[in-house]
Image (cartoon, rainbow, N blue to C red):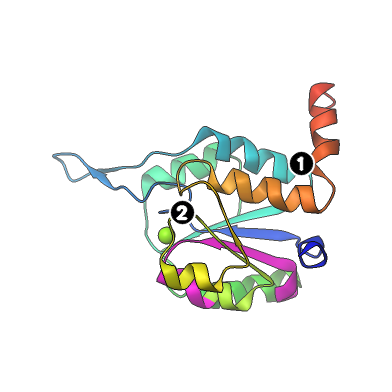
Amino acid sequence: MKELVKKIKILISDVDGVLTDGGLYYNDEGKVFKKFNVQDGLGIKLAQMAGLEIVIITGLKSEAVKARIKQLGITEYYEGFLKKDHLIKKISKEKKLKFEEMAYLGDDWVDGPAMKLVGLPMAVKNSQPEIKKIAKWISQKKGGEGALREAINFILSMQGKLEQLWEKWLKQEF
Ligand SMILES: [Mg+2]
């Protein structure tokens, strides 16, 4: 596992059911609200500091998600992509990354083809059973409860970067 994780340079994450609990709250005007976890937010910042690139992809289009992504300083955000494996191939070509250098965190069938491609397929605890079967790592936390933070911590820890980051953080060397 360690050898596999050491190669990872980029973590691609789904949104609904991973960054959120999958809930879609509709108001009377038909507007959708979603809840994000603040610990995932800091995790994304930590990953960026440690040189682990975070890419967010979602099959849906949502202004709420866009706003959150912007707030987190994520520049790589792809929305309305149902064929996520196509996007993985595109990212691999553009960034000259091998599939084995990529991790993907998902929860549902739409993530399956993309997870089959990458070196480190990851699933949240409450993923669909087929997705859990593909995954080489499963979070203890459910989607929306800090599962992305857990995935980031796992990768950074396996790469020997988490402890250093924490030391730096305590000394406020950023
Ligand atoms: Mg999902």
Q: CA distance from mark 1 to mark 2?
A: 21 Å
- Residue 29 magenta-highlighted: no
Q: Residues within 10 Å of mark 2 (few under 14, many from 20)?
A: many
Question: Measured along the vertical axis of the image, is residue 13 above or below residue 91?
Answer: above
The label number, if any, that marks residue 15 in the structure image: 2
Q: Amino acid at mark 2?
A: Val
Horizontally, is 74 left or right of 124 in the view?
right
Question: Measured along the vertical axis of the image, is residue 39 above or below residue 12?
Answer: above
Q: Residue at x 85, y 26 (%)?
A: 173
Foreground pick, 17 / 82: 17
Whether residue 25 appears in this view of the structure is: yes
Horizontally, is 43 left or right of 70 in the view?
right
Screen quadrant of the N terminus? bottom right
Q: Is mark 2 within 8 Å of ligand 1?
A: yes
Q: For numbered disc 1, what is the local secondary structure?
A: helix
Q: Residue at x 65, y 58 (%)?
A: 11
The image shows residue 139 at horizontal and vertical percentages of 56, 52
Q: Residue at x 54, y 47 (%)?
A: 147
Closer to the chain start, of discs 1 and 2, is: 2
Question: Measured along the vertical axis of the image, is residue 96 above or below residue 148?
Answer: below
The quadrant where residue 95 appears: bottom right
| Residue at the disc numbered 1 | 49
Q: Residue at x 44, y 61 (%)?
A: 127
The image shows residue 86 at horizontal and vertical percentages of 54, 78
Q: Which residues are magenta?
A: 98-113
Q: Amino acid at mark 1?
A: Met
Whether residue 110 appears in this view of the structure is: no
- Residue 111 magenta-highlighted: yes
Q: For numbered disc 2, what is the local secondary structure?
A: loop
Query: Disc 1, disc 2: CB below 8 Å?
Result: no
